[in-house]
Amino acid sequence: MAYSPHTEADHRRMLDAVGVVSIEDLFADIPPAVRADRFAVPPPLTEQEVRGELSRLAGRNVLPRVSFLGAGAYRHLVPAVVGEVIGRAEFATAYTPYQPEVSQGTLQSIYEFQSMVCELTGMEVASASHYDGATATAEAALMACRLTRRDRIAVSSAVHPQVREVLRTYCSGPGIEIVEVPAELAEGGSGLTAPDAAASVLDDDVACLVAQQPNFFGGIEPMRELGEAAHVVGAQLVALVEPTSLAILEAPGGYGADIVTAEGQPLGIPLSFGGPYVGLMAARMASVRQMPGRLVGATRDAQGRKGYVLTLQAREQHIRREKAASNICTNQALCALAATAYLSAVGPDGLREVAQLSMTQARHTAAALEEAGLGERRFTAPYFAEVAVRVPGAARRHAALLERGILAGHPLWTDYPDLDDTLLLAATELTTDDDIAALVDALEATR
């Protein structure tokens, strides 16, 4: 973005154009009790100084030479066609396509995105416009509360910690209680959510059980049994899935999930130091009127020509405002388009190959560490492409490896204090045998 400072005369012209006397008048509708009087903004800089500061900050964004970090965001090869498609000028906008007569391209791309999400998840209807997987999951939990008219939510402790934090934030406003289902994380445990443990906290007041597949530790959860435990008491199963894994794992629609969410970043969206990403959500058709997010449908005009429109708009904030079921955000269409272009480019066979390579390299990583006597698996359950490995002196060695340009996964003790000396290592199709050898050699050197 160009550096364009505003003079006092510029301020005056803008204020006159909107019909107010001062900048403070722009915030008159915000109650004084919640209005900030001043911000800790640094003093103004010249253009040269701004360029220097931005260059300094950008220089800190350096990816390690070798990385095994996953924990919800993953390195995947993004085909060149993805950038070519989303770089087209007609798609370079985040504006919600309320006017179908001038938005057919964007509407069709969202429609195709929804169709692919349905095919991936085995569900009947999908929406768009969710910020990321965490907010989509929180929206799904609130949706389940509306559908069941209940005000308690059960969530597995094996769900990503940041997702659970977002869920707590979303539920704090309406006063929805969250109960946690403890996963089997003790020494020698499975690392999974036991259906019996879920059943013990599920009752007639619980709207849904939120479970992750694969879970935060990469373990393959017994989702069918967890769903049955929820359905016995009339609760819904909200399945947070990793989309790449759906190429080889059972689709959520097959094991009885009621609402499915996912972080769409693995589908053609680069890591970008945290975003922007895109959330996926799919559900049963019977629940569609309580489903948040944009929903694009196909129709015919008076001449019989096929067209695309936003449908079920009575849910939307531009009509129902604070009573809307839709989440209030940009429509995320550009990131959704990237996911659509990615899935179109790799196809079902390509996505399956990505999943299989990721799974294979994760096993090679765990095996190499065990064979070298450097670590051992923390949990016993089957896993997908992430594995929790106990490494003696992990905190010291994790820091030492980072100085060598090797990011040895996610330190689990930062989220789970009992999992001391345990690293969560992720692999993708970009993880090479040389990367694994470098990890082993570096850990060996830091014994």
Image (cartoon, rainbow, N blue to C red):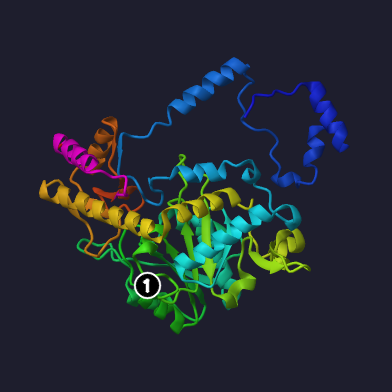
Tell me the residue at 53%/18% (across/down). 52
Foreground of the two, 66 or 84:
84
- Per the rendered image, the range of residues in magenta is 426-446
Task: Quadrant for residue 252, please give it.
Answer: bottom left
Observer able to see residue 97: yes
Place of residue 357 in the rendered image (x, y in percent of width and height, measured from the top left):
28, 53
Foreground of the two, 66 or 413:
66
Place of residue 447 in the rendered image (x, y in percent of width and height, measured from the top left):
14, 38
As drawn, 127 above or below 358:
below
Residue under numbered circle 1: 223
Give the residue furthest to the bottom: 232
Foreground of the two, 205 or 101:
101
- Quadrant the N terminus occupies: top right
Task: Quadrant for residue 304, please give it.
Answer: bottom right
Observer able to see residue 386: no
Place of residue 66 in the rendered image (x, y in percent of width and height, measured from the top left):
29, 37
Tell me the residue at 59%/78% (across/down). 286
> Main SS of the magenta segment?
helix
Type of amino acid at the residue the image marks with label 1? Met
- Is residue 311 part of the magenta span, yes or no? no
- Is residue 443 part of the magenta span, yes or no? yes
As drawn, 156 above or below 447:
below
Tell me the residue at 42%/59% (across/down). 243
Foreground of the two, 349 or 374:
349
Place of residue 80 in the rendered image (x, y in percent of width and height, measured from the top left):
45, 42
**Under tag 1, what secondary structure?**
helix
